[in-house]
Amino acid sequence: MISTTPRKKSKPASPEAPTRSTRSRMTGLLAGAALMAVAATACLPVEQWVPDTNGDGQITQDEIDHQTQVLTDAIQQAAAQQRQAVQLHPFLTCVRHHESDNGPYPHANGYGAKNPSSTASGAYQFLDSTWRNVSTRAGHPGYSRAAYAPPEVQDAVALWVYDHGGRSAWNGSGC
């Protein structure tokens, strides 16, 4: 996605901070998912989703809180595994290697890469205009440049582009 035609120098776009930090967004997302899991189980008698761990024949608030934490931990683990699976996608790994990564895995520095001769940035070297378009379509708006988005967002947008027939965007990368 690196432009080979010379471009007129222009001011780089200033970073636009998302309305919420990535960490609070992810925490909110996971908390919402856990709350939905708990709410969905509210249709079932509490005895069907909360085990009576002390065997006294009653479900206590401590047992409910413990089971809620177990569900929350499971959701967080599943989300982390999904993020890792996306990051390790063979095509995305190849593109990052050719576009922005230097050195051994993990390639954290490649996510902040900026092309000095174009507006391309981030691990997948999205041009700013392309990034704003596809990141919005992929469900991750709010970042003016790819380099300003956290790694998991860059990975998710790149995978969305790949899954929607955008592999040709990285033809010159050798992948």
Image (cartoon, grey):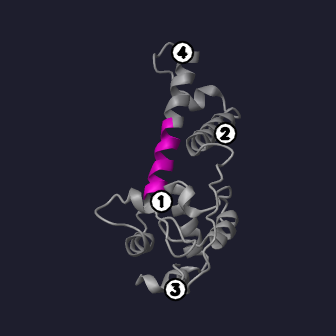
Q: Earlier in the sequence, mark 2 or mark 4?
A: 2
Q: Secondary structure at mark 2?
A: helix
Q: Residues within 10 Å of mark 1 (few under 14, many from 20)?
A: some
Is mark 2 in CB contact (under 8 Å) with mark 3? no
In this image, 82 relative to 132: left or right? left
Which amino acid type is marked by label 4? Answer: Gly
Point out the frontmost of discs 2 and 4: 2
Reading the chain from its start, which is encountered first: label 3 or label 4?
3
* Residue 68 horizontal/vertical position (percent): 56, 29
Q: Nearer the viewer, mark 1 or mark 2?
A: 1
Judged left or right of residue 18, residue 62 is left
Please name the residue shown 58% across and 46% down the image.
Answer: 22
Q: Amino acid under label 3? A: Thr
For the residues bearing labels 3 and 1, Cβ distance under 8 angstroms? no
Q: Find the distance from the CA under tag 1 to the CA under tag 2.
A: 34 Å
Q: Residues within 10 Å of mark 3 (few under 14, many from 20)?
A: few
Residue 159, x across and y down, in percent: 54, 68
Q: Gap in Å between the C-alphas at discs 3 and 1?
A: 20 Å
Magenta residues, dominant SS class: helix
Q: Earlier in the sequence, mark 3 or mark 1?
A: 3
Label placed on residue 112: 1
Residue matched to label 3? 4
Quick check: can you spot residue 59?
no
How far apart marks 2 and 3 lie (CA) works out to: 48 Å
- Give me the residue at 39% from left, 74% from top: 94
Q: Residue at x 45, y 70 (%)?
A: 92
Q: Which residue is mark 4?
A: 57
